[in-house]
Amino acid sequence: MTWDPFLSELELQFAAQAQAERRLAATETERVRIAELALTDRLSALAEVRAAVALWLAGAAPVRGRLVLAGPDWAAIEDESSALSLVAVGAIVRIDLPAVTIADSVREIRAPRPLRARMGLAWMLRELGRRRVGVRVWDVDGNIVTGTIDRVGTDHLDLAVHDAGQSRREAVGDIRVVPLVRLARVVGDLDL
């Protein structure tokens, strides 16, 4: 018996076993990485590729369009008419997306921009109020109200209620205080 064929066979077996162990380790590493993903991570990954999605919201009709931005507790979706909706992540009941897009939602994303990671829903709403943008606001019960955001606290907003297109100064009827946990969607002249 010569040793060369025997050693060659052992080397091939060892190489195959080592490759199988590397594949298993890579698979387990990927499972652990995916297990640590938050919904906002997946939304950010989908926004990077401007994925077509339908966001189903509590108490509201689904918002369909391209996901264009995502923050720590909000997502912005552009519909076919180019209107932007600011959606509270806490109001999302489910996300529908094409099967070919699912891999995009779990891929590793670029490091989030430090400022955008701190731009929460309250900050975005304050900016809309500062700019005096007329908005339509949906709550998680499906109620819709139009007006202008007057103030935003840490967990609520004050909405000056008036008809769409009317100036706030001319037509404020009531002020509604809306807890942010009850907010589903805001649509306005969002120049993000």
Image (cartoon, grey):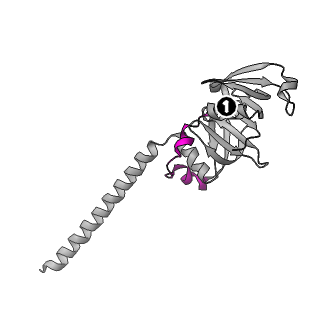
Q: Residues within 10 Å of mark 1 (few under 14, many from 20)?
A: some
- Residue that carries the numbered disc 1 in the rendered image: 126
Left or right of 8 in this view: 65: right
- Residue 81 horizontal/vertical position (percent): 79, 48
Residue at image x 76%, y 48%? 82
Q: Decide whether residue 53 is among the magenta residues.
A: no
Which of the pair 21/80 is nearer the observer?
Answer: 80
Residue 184, image quadrant: top right
Residue at image x 69%, y 22%? 178
Look at label 1 and name its amino acid. Answer: Arg
Residue 9, image quadrant: bottom left
Residue at image x 44%, y 43%? 35
Q: Quadrant of the N terminus?
A: bottom left
Is 144 drawn above or below residue 188 in the view shown? above
Left or right of 7 in this view: 120: right
Q: Quadrant of the C terminus?
A: top right
Is 183 drawn above or below residue 101 in the view shown? above
User: Which residues make up the magenta segment?
Assistant: 99-120
- Residue 135 horizontal/vertical position (percent): 77, 33
Q: Decide whether residue 118 is among the magenta residues.
A: yes
Count of numbered tags: 1
Residue 173, image quadrant: top right
